[in-house]
Structures are given as C-alpha cells and as structure tokens.
Image: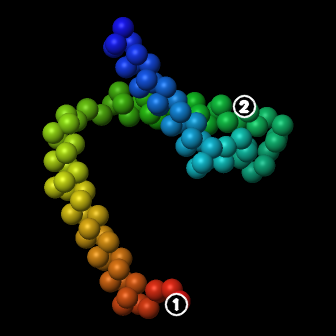
Amino acid sequence: MAFGLFFLGEYANMFLMSAMTSILFLGGWYGPFGLLPVLGPIWLILKICACLFVFLWVRATFPRYRYDQLMRLGWKVFLPLSLLWLVITAGALLAFGWLPHA
C-alpha cells in the first residue's frame, strides 16, 4: 500500500508540474498564433500531454542518481559554478556600467 501511494504521488507530481509548466511557460490555453481560441482547453491538454511525455521520456531514458551522488554534484559542481557565475555577472555589471541608477 505504501509503494502504491508513493507511486501515485510521484505521477501526480509529474502531472501537476506539466500543468504548471504549460500554464506558466507555454501560453496555457492559447493556441499557436492565436488560432481557434474556442479550443482553449484542448490546447492546454495537448501541452500538458507534451510536457508529461518529456517527463516520462527523460525518466525512462536517463539513469537515476543516488542521494549521495546528487549531494556531491550539488556541493562540488553546481555551487562553485553558480558562485563563479555570480561573480562574473557582478563584474560585468560593474565593468560595463550596466548597474541601475538610483
């Protein structure tokens, strides 16, 4: 029973993330180039299905990382890269005078 609830929660998360991605980043119920605005719910369902397909495709294709591997990747790779990018961005803003004036 616990595995079933975990599995259900994982797929519900994928569905909700696909819906939020469709609404926030893909235009929601609007069709391409404003075509057929009456079919708004169908466009939204198609976008959710496309995002869900990508979720499932990536999940089935790539191997899963263990928790210790994710922690090592985050602390040893992503944190230094993000700090370096922060310094580069701040340096570029100062060097080129792109800071907003108060």
Q: Earlier in the sequence, mark 1 or mark 2?
A: 2
User: Can I make out residue 83 in this image?
Assistant: yes
Q: Amino acid at mark 2?
A: Ile
Q: Residue at x 31, y 77 (%)?
A: 88
Q: Residue at x 51, y 86 (%)?
A: 100
Mark 2: secondary structure: helix
For the image, the number of numbered tags is 2
Residue topped by disc 2: 42
**39 displayed left or right of 44:** right
Say if mark 1 contacts mark 2, CB within 8 Å: no
Query: Residue 43 placed where, x, y %?
Result: 70, 36
**46 displayed left or right of 75:** right
Query: Residue 16 placed where, x, y %?
Result: 53, 33
Query: Residue 1 placed where, x, y %?
Result: 36, 8
Residue topped by disc 1: 101
Q: Residue at x 61, y 37 (%)?
A: 47
